[in-house]
Image (cartoon, grey):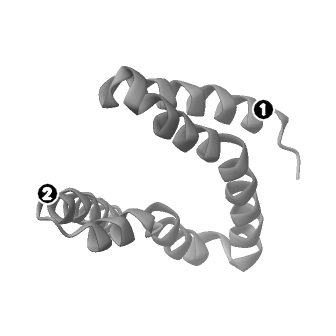
Amino acid sequence: MLQYVFSFIVGGLVTTAIVYFEASGLPLLSRLAALVPVFTWLAYLLMGDISGPKEISSHALFVLLGTLVAWVPYMFTIYYMAPRIGSVKAVLLGILVFLILAIIFIKIYKI
């Protein structure tokens, strides 16, 4: 249970750091924090103890391919649509695009 609490705290700290640095006029630090793969980093550390390196490798391939299929279109949607429809609507649309593509990818992924 302690591992889950640690994961929650680290994830919250990184999210807070991203917002804080951006609001403080430190975009370099904000962007660096945004690029840190917190979720996979913590998950793989915890999963490695349970499942071992072969499962981590397999999962990493799944995430890599899923990133190309769902994350890249999500980010492009936000990039392209934010100036046109506003940030909140662009993020919501991006999440919808991500969820649709991620569900399709999960359903067809067989490796």
Query: Disc 2 residue type?
Result: Ala
Quadrant of residue 61 in the image?
bottom right
Q: Secondary structure at mark 1?
A: helix
Between residues 92 and 56, which one lies in front from this camera angle?
Answer: 92
Q: Residue placed at 83% from the left, 42% from the top?
A: 109
Residue sitting at the far front = 83
Q: For residue 14, which quarter of the picture?
A: bottom left
Residue shown at 73% from the left, 68% from the top: 55
Above or below, comparing residue 64 to residue 29 in the picture: above
Q: Is residue 15 left or right of residue 109?
A: left
Q: Is residue 61 above or below residue 107?
A: below
Which label's residue is closer to the chain start, 1 or 2? 2
Neighbour tally class for label 1: few under 14, some 14-19, many 20 plus, Cα within 10 Å: few
**Residue found 11% across the figure and 64% down from its top:** 24
User: Would residue 105 be seen by someone viewing this image from the given angle?
Assistant: yes
Horizontal side of residue 18 vs 45, given as left or right: left
Q: Residue, x 31% and y 73% (percent of image)?
A: 28
Give x and y (percent) for residue 75: 53, 43
- Residue flagged by tag 1: what amino acid is it? Lys
- Label 2: few (<14), some or many (≥20) within 10 Å? few
**The label number, if any, that marks residue 107 in the structure image:** 1
Q: Which residue is mark 2?
A: 23
Q: Residue 60: x and y, percent?
A: 69, 65
- Residue 70 drawn at (x, y percent): 65, 41
Task: Calculate the distance from the C-alpha at mark 1 to the C-alpha at mark 2.
Answer: 39 Å
Mark 2 falls on what kind of element? helix
Determine whether, in the image, residue 14 is placed left or right of residue 82: left
The relative height of residue 11 versus residue 105 in the rendered view (above or below) is below
